[in-house]
Image (cartoon, rainbow, N blue to C red):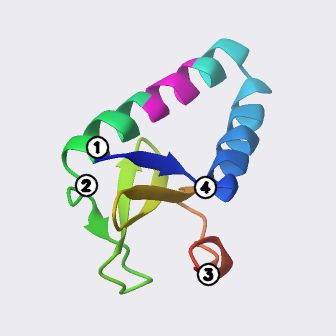
Amino acid sequence: MRVAWSETSLVRVEDISHHIALDDAGAAARWVVELFDLVESQLSAFPESGRIGPELGARTIRELVFGDYRVFYRIGEGVEVLSVRHGSQLLREDEVRD
């Protein structure tokens, strides 16, 4: 199944990587590569492997946990990554709205 990243999700990944890079630029680069590798490989093969986002209740929006981060995505004709958030942050509804 094809995996696409929304503009919001790409901005979130960039923001997070910049934050990580404040301490360790190499770690930030590795984090981005590992995130994309995991999401692409797991969700293209097993799109329903993530759990339904508990605060959303929508069966088409799921989350995949990557370390301390939650990757929110929607299943449709393909997989659309909607947002990436630290586990301690609440998901904003505007990040997953159609």
- N-terminal-most mark, 1 or 4: 4
* Marks 3 & 2, CB-CB < 8 Å contact: no
Which residue in the structure is indicated by mark 2? Answer: 47
| Residue at the extreme front | 77
Which residue in the structure is indicated by mark 1? Answer: 44
Q: Which residues are magenta?
A: 30-36
- Say whether residue 32 is left or right of residue 54: right
Does the magenta-highlighted stretch encompass residue 31? Answer: yes
Could you tell me which quadrant the C terminus lies in? bottom right
* Marks 1 & 4, CB-CB < 8 Å contact: no
The CA distance from mark 3 to mark 4 is: 15 Å
Does the magenta-highlighted stretch encompass residue 81? Answer: no
- Is 60 above or below relative to 20? below
Q: Which mark is on residue 93?
A: 3
Q: Amino acid at mark 4?
A: Ser
Which residue in the structure is indicated by mark 4? Answer: 6
Q: Amino acid at mark 1?
A: Ser
- N-terminal-most mark, 3 or 4: 4
- Is 78 above or below relative to 21? below
Q: Residues within 10 Å of mark 1 (few under 14, many from 20)?
A: some
